[in-house]
Image (cartoon, coloured by chain):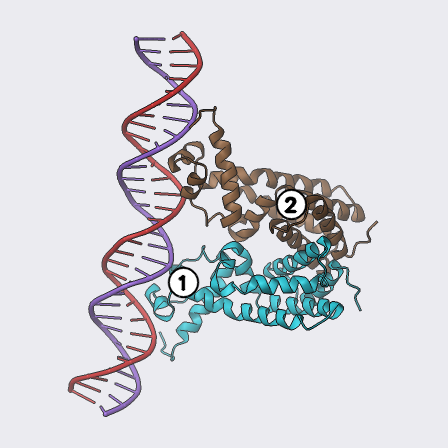
Chain colours: A brown, B cyan, C purple, D red
DNA sequence: ACCGTAGCTGACCGATCGGTCAGGGGATCT
DNA sequence: AGATCCCCTGACCGATCGGTCAGCTACGGT
């Protein structure tokens, strides 16, 4: 085995991301990750405090990105907010599609996870923007439908090139929301 | 403890359905179910061959219903198929919303489960009908978005009365698909 | 040459998992 | 009363889980 500084840590994260997305967090054991990363289970726990620490490191970037985006949304008014929310959410979902899959795969447990504690607030603000600041049942149901639809579509392995996927998701989401497309 | 013929079996199924939906299949142990159903773990395994058998019994009705519905869709042409697919799928998703949550929570493993072996074919036919028999990327992405959006929305605990929920989901799905609403 | 440290490992641990098994208790039959 | 069957249970089992620990190896600084 070659000896670069420590590519091991990065490799562990990559393998864990792939395995978590494929078999879920609970469905992936430290042994599985170790085999995939060509190292021992003990080596994982040298680089990371525990299984949860690996998950935390994987989910921190998307969680912070979503949180930041939802903050920016607050400064926009109705129509601008809807379009910004749709394009922003679709972009984030595509960039972090594996992480999205992990989160949605075990939602209840994930929302109890400290690193995702900011998610409910962020999602609430996102839903508020998607629904055009309306409290109507229709707006809330549609916001939920867009959030879920985009996430599931991005997480599924649909054989479509990313550009088309992004465009269709944005247009589809705007249609779902009943938002006039420019 | 009272002694009716065997309400135990039904009670086990009810508790398992609730717990699987709340914590996932892998996240629920036989012990958890036993505690919830006020019986011993051994009693579960007297009534059912194993943990998988409980899941099978829970998921068989929705799997068969979806399969049957997708068959009926094949007899319809474009526009009729789209509307029938949307209303049929929304209806099934709402009726079996807990089962939908279980399936979507651990999709990869679930699709490997024998009782759900019919699902990919059924979903493919459903997607085909939702997409208006088109092979365009747009149609496939939108079909996926509707299937995921409806499922996630139904599985989430949105505080909306069922009638409104059903109506909004149908209208929202039709808008997503770009289908003219009557 | 010596040593400290970073990277990594095999062996092991307690907890929990799904599942097995011999047997108890209470109805219902003969 | 005895036999039989259905429900149900406590005790137990092997496998696997996440995690610990003492110690090995190789390299850089002195």
Callout 2 secondary element: helix
Check the residue under mark 1 and report the chain it is in: B
Indicate the chain on which mark 2 is placed.
A
Give residue A59's quadrant in the image.
top right
- Residue hosting label 1: B51
Q: Residue at x 35, y 66 (%)?
A: B45
| Camera-nearest residue between A84 and A22 | A22
Viewer-proximal residue among A7 and B164: A7
Local packing at callout 1 (Cα closer than 10 Å; few below 14, some 14-19, many 20+) is: some
Q: Which mark is residue B164?
A: none
The answer to whether residue A1 is above or below residue B12 is above
Q: Give residue B111's position: percent from left, percent from top.
A: 52, 58
Residue B124 visible to the viewer: yes
Q: Is residue A2 left or right of residue A133?
A: left
Residue that carries the numbered disc 2 in the rendered image:
A93
Q: Secondary structure at mark 1?
A: helix
Residue A131 seen in render: no
**Residue found 61% across the figure and 69% down from its top:** B92
In the image: residue A34, left or right of residue B179? left
Q: Position of residue B117 (x, y in %)?
A: 52, 63
Count residues near mark 2 (Cα–Cα under 10 Å), then give few for <14, some for 14-19, many for 20+: many
A40 is higher (above) or lower (below) than B128? above
Query: Residue B35 at what x, y percent from top left?
Result: 39, 63
User: In the picture provided, is C14 more to the left or to the right than B90?
Assistant: left
Q: Quadrant of residue B177?
A: bottom right
Q: Tell whether B87 sits left or right of B113.
A: right
Residue at point 58% right, 63% down?
A: B121
Q: Are marks 2 and 1 on the same chain?
A: no
């Amino acid at each position: 085995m070659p000896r670069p500084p420590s590519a091991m840590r990065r490799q562990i994260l990559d393998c864990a991301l792939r395995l978590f997305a494929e078999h879920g967090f609970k469905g992936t054991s430290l042994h599985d990750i170790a085999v995939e990363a060509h190292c021992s289970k003990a080596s994982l726990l040298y680089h990371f405090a525990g299984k949860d620490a690996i998950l935390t490191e994987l989910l921190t970037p998307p969680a912070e990105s979503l949180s930041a985006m939802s903050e920016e949304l607050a400064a926009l008014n109705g129509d601008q907010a809807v379009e910004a929310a749709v394009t922003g959410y679709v972009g984030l979902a595509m960039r972090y599609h594996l992480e999205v899959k992990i989160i949605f795969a075990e939602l209840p447990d994930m929302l109890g996870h400290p690193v995702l504690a900011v998610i409910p607030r962020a999602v609430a603000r996102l839903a508020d923007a998607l629904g055009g600041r309306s409290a109507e049942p229709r707006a809330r149901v549609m916001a939920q439908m867009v959030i879920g639809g985009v996430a599931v579509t991005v997480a599924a392995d649909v054989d479509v090139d990313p550009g088309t996927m992004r465009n269709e998701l944005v247009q589809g989401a705007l249609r779902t929301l009943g938002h006039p497309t420019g």
